Image (spheres, grey):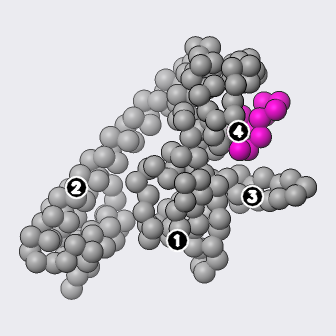
Amino acid sequence: MYAYIKGEVAEIDDSSIVIDNNGIGYNITVPGSVTDSGMNIGDEVKIYTHFAVREDAMQLYGFISKDDLFMFRLLLGVNGIGPKAACAILSGLSADDLRFAVLSDDAASIARAPGVGKKTAQKIILELKDKVDLGDAFELKAAHNEKRAAKEEANSAETEAVMALTALGYPNAQALKAVKSASKKQGESSSVEDLLKAALKELF
């Protein structure tokens, strides 16, 4: 029903977030990897979603990447694994880690998730082994590492730009807002100098 929801983070809880999209607040259940990602209230985010319907409830589950959503849906295809259990597994294991756990018969890592015992973990491995490819696992892992490194570099540039603005006398909150706005327009590959110039334009 919903491929993704894009909007501003209005609330953050241990297991859920609320995304404000054009005045509508979407309550989305998320794994710990989402709430622990450095997300803050007021951030503009894009969350890939799965709409789960039961007789007694309807609930949105959300993930930062399409790959996490893909692995979540693979888990739902395992007999006896519902959305809550799948979400719990992806709270403790990234999509990459889950793939390698399945390929290496590492039931112990999967069984660390709350409510997932060793037998259930072994069932997950048995049912997903033919659906996970080793070559794809390595390619996706490399791509994710590259993206993570680029994001860390971008975060470092943002931090330096904010520090430069505060050194010029701008309040922390104002400097951070200007740099975040500039970063969205400039892109993750922007240098500190480019970010600083764009942020100064935001302030005038």
Nearer the observer, disc 3 or disc 4? 4
**Residue type, label 2:** Ala
Residue 75 counted in the magenta span: yes
**In terms of secondary structure, where does tag 1 sit?**
strand
Answer above or below: position of 123 versus 65. Answer: above
**In terms of secondary structure, where does tag 4 sit?**
helix
Residue shown at the point (34%, 48%) measured from the top left: 151
Label located before the other in sequence (2 or 1): 1
Label located before the other in sequence (3 or 4): 3
Q: Position of residue 153 (x, y in %)?
A: 27, 47
Q: Which residues are magenta?
A: 74-85
Residue shown at the point (49%, 23%) measured from the top left: 138
Residue 171: image quadrant is bottom left
Nearer the observer, disc 3 or disc 2? 3
Numbered tag placed on residue 10 in the rendering = 1
Residue shown at the point (78%, 52%) measured from the top left: 52
Label located before the other in sequence (3 or 2): 3
Nearer the observer, disc 2 or disc 4? 4
Q: Which residue is mark 2?
A: 157
Q: Which residue is mark 4?
A: 85
Residue closer to the observer: 141 or 115: 115
